[in-house]
Amino acid sequence: VQLQAFGGGLVQAGGSLALSCTLSGSIFSRNSMGAMGWFRQAPGKERGFVAIISWNGGVTYVADSVKGRSAISKDNVNNTVHLRMNNLRPEDTAVYYCVAKRRPGLSSEWDEYHYWGQGTQVTVSS
């Protein structure tokens, strides 16, 4: 299983950003996935949960820190997860990691996710 993330970059505070992540691998691997989503890590801080979506795209779980200004969705045909973030703040600056887990259930615990993408930098300037 591989996770390829797209998006990120430099954005001004109050602006918007879209991140995407595509999961690739064998049909068996893809069919055994339970959820996909995003975590982030700012310099000097621990990894933090951002948003997760069930593999069929029917259920989402968004962190309180981004709730109301973020939306996660999934393209089931292309096994791609999209994260849209609005009204960005400097504290949203971090490396964003796409993640996936094999077992069903949405979790905010990073150690429950088996697969991690390479990370993409998001920088919000004030």
Image (cartoon, rainbow, N blue to C red):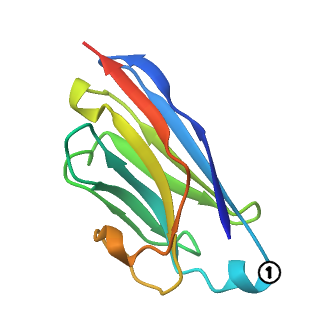
Residue at the spot 37% in from the left edge and 77% down from the top edge:
112
Q: Which residue is mark 1?
A: 27
In the image, 25 versus 69, the foreground residue is 25
In the image, 68 versus 82, the foreground residue is 82
**What's the residue type where badge 1 is placed?**
Ile
Residue at the spot 41% in from the left edge and 18% down from the top edge:
11
Left or right, 90 with reference to 18: left
Where disc 1 sits, the SS reads helix
When the figure is inspected, residue 35 is found, relative to residue 16, above or below; the finding is: below
Residue 124 position within the rendered picture, expressed as x and y whole percent measured from the top left: 33, 22
Residue at the spot 34% in from the left edge and 36% down from the top edge:
94
When the figure is inspected, residue 21 is found, relative to residue 14, above or below; the finding is: below
Split into 4 quadrants, where in the image is the C terminus?
top left
Left or right, 40 with reference to 65: right
Residue 51 position within the rendered picture, expressed as x and y whole percent measured from the top left: 37, 57
Residue 13 position within the rendered picture, expressed as x and y whole percent measured from the top left: 30, 17
Q: Please, which residue is most extreme toward the front here?
A: 44
Residue 116 position within the rendered picture, expressed as x and y whole percent measured from the top left: 51, 61
